[in-house]
Image (cartoon, grey):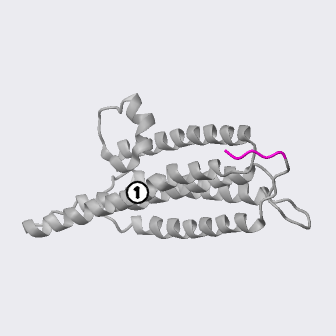
Amino acid sequence: MAETQEPVRVNLNVMRARLTILGFNLAIITFQIKELQTLGGGIALPGIEQSLHVSAATALFMSLALSIVSMISLIASCATDQDGFCSHWSLPAGDLLMYLALAQTVAGFFGAFHAEFELVALPDRQQAEMLALINAAMDTCGGIAWGVAVYLGPAVSLLRSPFPRRTNVTLGLAYLGLLLLVGRIWTTALHLEAQDPTPASLLESWLGGLVAPLIW
């Protein structure tokens, strides 16, 4: 991790680029939340007319919250002076929150369509094989995107961070803790949607979210 003795001064455009990505992510979330209402499957809950895709909705709403917090963190990192450089550790913190938000969007998007494909039963064997191939390809692409967002992006961000090593290590540990918590919430929603009466193991509950593409 990069060390520096001088005050950190990151160009304002670095922060602006991340805000643009978050705005794009919020647009995807809005689209997909509306799209969930048209998908089959899900579970019926008392008081709700339509079936609810609990796992996908949970991932998308967590992504929404993480995106907003990330935007606030990024904006707060900018000094309010005539230069406007980003000089606060909330810049890499917002960076990590952005990556986690993107990962949750991927989980909510690809997970919902994987569940939709699982409901399809084609009578023709050849068509069924083609559908299975398409489903596997979507899962692979989604899994790669999720892994890049949740692991590679944060690692590169921390390794290239101009902030002190102690700050980067602290942020990395906080990110891992948040990742475990978000994964715990998501696996709980997944277990509820599956309507499995068997309680999930402690290992599956806390570590399942670390390998989300393998279980969505």
The image shows residue 164 at horizontal and vertical percentages of 75, 43
Residue 72 visible, this angle:
yes
Predominant SS along the magenta part: loop
170 or 183, nearer to the observer:
170
In the rendered image, the vertical position of residue 4 relative to residue 142, given as above or below: above
Give the magenta-colored segment's residue range: 1-5
Is 163 positioned to the left or the right of 140 in the image?
right
Is 31 positioned to the left or the right of 112 in the image?
right
Is 118 positioned to the left or the right of 44 in the image?
left
In the rendered image, the vertical position of residue 140 relative to residue 30, given as above or below: above
Q: Which residue is mark 1?
A: 144
202 or 87, nearer to the observer:
87
The image shows residue 176 at horizontal and vertical percentages of 56, 39
Q: Residue at x 39, y 66 (%)?
A: 37
Q: How many marks?
A: 1
- Magenta stretch contains residue 8: no
The image shows residue 36 at horizontal and vertical percentages of 40, 64
Secondary structure category for the residue under label 1: helix
Dividing the picture into quarters, in which one does residue 174 lie? top right
Please rate how many residues cluster around mark 1, counting C-alpha atoms within 10 Å: few if below 14, some from 14 to 19, many from 20. Answer: some
Dividing the picture into quarters, in which one does residue 146 lie? bottom left
The image shows residue 155 at horizontal and vertical percentages of 57, 48
Dividing the picture into quarters, in which one does residue 1 lie? top right
80 or 56, nearer to the observer:
80
Residue 50 visible, this angle:
no
Q: Residue at x 64, y 55 (%)?
A: 95
Amino acid type at image mark 1: Ile
